[in-house]
Image (spheres, rainbow, N blue to C red):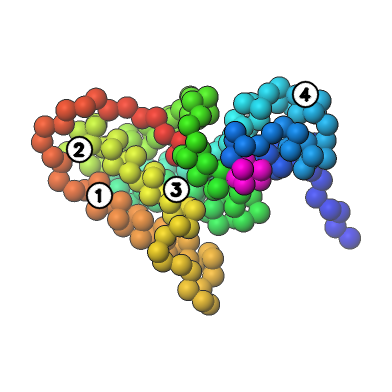
Amino acid sequence: MAKPAHFSTKDRILGAAEELFAQHGFAGTSLRQVTSQADVNIAAVNYHFGSKENLVNEVFRRRMDEMTGARLAQLERARNEHPGQLRPVLAAFVEPALALAQDRQSGGAFVRVIARAYAEKNDNLRKFLSDHYGHVLREFGKAIATCVPGLSKEELYWRLDFLAGSLTYAMADFGLIKRPAGVTETAHRAHAAHELIHFAEAGFRAAARSGSALPASIDSTQ
């Protein structure tokens, strides 16, 4: 007989915090609520995380590390197997994120936490994400620039930022098009990825405008 899955104290705290942040937001969730839901004492939270701020960061880290690894691995394959082709690069950015969103056990609450991150102003979280995951967007920016060399750096970053926002929207499944009856979640997400990649490719290939005036930089939670 298979043994039940064992969750460490740290895992239980992270799972409880993720669910509560999704429901109530970061400011609206207390450590007392987290300890109650995780069935641990406050000393356990302090031991593993040290502060609520670090707990918030670690909730993001455990999901973002997984998604980042999948994205960069797929991006490397795209560069090696399809050099100069834009669509495989965009697929490497979109597909791992939608796969995470599809996994209701590990990703459902986290998608709502991402929405909270956009809705709530949290400078510490924004800095954490920029410091630890900004390189991912820069790596994709470089790969996309190789495929569409006519874009200025500012134009490329604007379009990448719009793609990130569209992807977050698709992950949350807020769109007008809902999963039809009889269509599996996997098939629905695959179709969403196909449509988003097609849309993004057209956006990146749109003619560059003249007279870009603002310096470009990357700082995004996505």
Q: Earlier in the sequence, mark 4 or mark 2?
A: 4
Please give the residue where the numbered disc 3 appears in the rendered image: 168
Q: Residue 56 carries which label?
A: none
Q: Does the magenta stretch include residue 23?
A: yes
Relative horizontal placement of residue 47, taking residue 18 as reference (left or right)? right
Residue 47 has which mark? 4
**Residue 48 against residue 37 in the figure, above or below:** above
- Residue under the point 39% across and 45% down: 165
Q: How far apart are marks 2 and 1 (CA)?
A: 11 Å
Labels 1, 3: front one = 3
Foreground mark, 1 or 4, reads: 4
CB of mark 1 within 8 Å of CB of mark 3? Answer: no
**Segment colored magenta:** 19-24
The residue to which callout 2 is attached is 151
Residue 216: give x, y in percent of width and height: 27, 28
In the structure shown, which secondary structural element does the residue marked by tag 3 occupy?
Answer: helix
> Badge 1 is on which residue?
203
Examine the image and state in which quarter residue 36 appears: top right
Q: How crowded is mark 2: few (under 14 residues within 10 Å), some or many (20 or more)?
A: many
Amino acid type, callout 3: Thr
The answer to whether marks 3 and 2 mark residues whose Cβ atoms lie closer than 8 Å is: no
Q: How far apart are marks 3 and 4 (CA)?
A: 33 Å
Identity of the residue drawn at 54% across and 48% down: 111
The answer to if 198 sits in the magenta stretch is no
From this viewpoint, is residue 182 visible?
Answer: yes
Question: What's the CA distance linking mark 1 and mark 4?
Answer: 47 Å
Task: Give the residue type that dot 4 points to.
Answer: Tyr
Local packing at callout 3 (Cα closer than 10 Å; few below 14, some 14-19, many 20+) is many
